[in-house]
Image (spheres, rainbow, N blue to C red):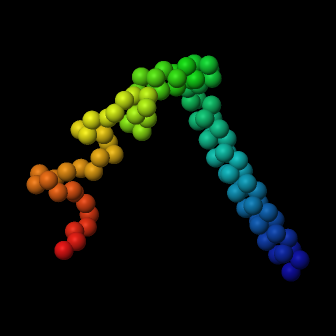
Amino acid sequence: MPNNYTQLTSKKSYNISEAKLKRILEYNERLKEQLELPRIPVSEASSSLVEYCTVTKDPLLPSIWGPVKKEEDPFTPAMKGNGGTSGCCIMM
């Protein structure tokens, strides 16, 4: 009986060790993938962000960009062909 018990415990610890190794190897692969991602310096990223913000019009800032025409406003409700608003619910 003791021999059988040691075999079971050694198999169990072996399975736990295999699971830990598998988890570590998967984590290592994810880290390798992240290492291969393209990287740019912070100064370059910040200047790119500043350039984007100065070039791209923001309809929520009319004080900076001026009033937005209804056709260009992405927050204006869409109109159907008959002049009604398009929505998911119709009240009768």
In which quarter of the view is residue 40 placed? top right
In which quarter of the view is residue 55 placed? top left
Q: Is residue 82 above or below residue 28?
A: below
Q: Is residue 41 above or below residue 31?
A: above
Q: Nearer the viewer, residue 44 or 59?
A: 59
Q: Nearer the viewer, residue 3 or 45?
A: 45
How many numbered marks does the figure carry? 0
The residue sitting at 22% across, 68% down in the picture is: 90
> Is residue 61 at least partly visible in the picture?
yes
Q: Is residue 85 left or right of residue 45?
A: left
Furthest-right residue in this view: 2
Q: Position of residue 42 (x, y in %)?
A: 63, 23
Q: Is residue 53 left or right of residue 78?
A: right
Q: Nearer the viewer, residue 85 or 32?
A: 85
Q: Position of residue 15 (x, y in %)?
A: 73, 62
The residue sitting at 14% across, 53% down in the picture is: 83
The residue sitting at 58% across, 23% down in the picture is: 46
The residue sitting at 30% across, 40% down in the picture is: 73
Q: Position of residue 77 (x, y in %)?
A: 27, 51
Q: Is residue 53 above or below residue 6?
A: above
Quadrant into which the C terminus falls: bottom left
Q: Nearer the viewer, residue 66 or 48?
A: 66
Furthest-left residue in this view: 82
Quadrant into which the N terminus falls: bottom right
Furthest-bottom residue in this view: 1
Q: Is residue 88 left or right of residue 24?
A: left
Q: Position of residue 13 (x, y in %)?
A: 79, 63
> Is residue 40 at least partly visible in the picture?
no
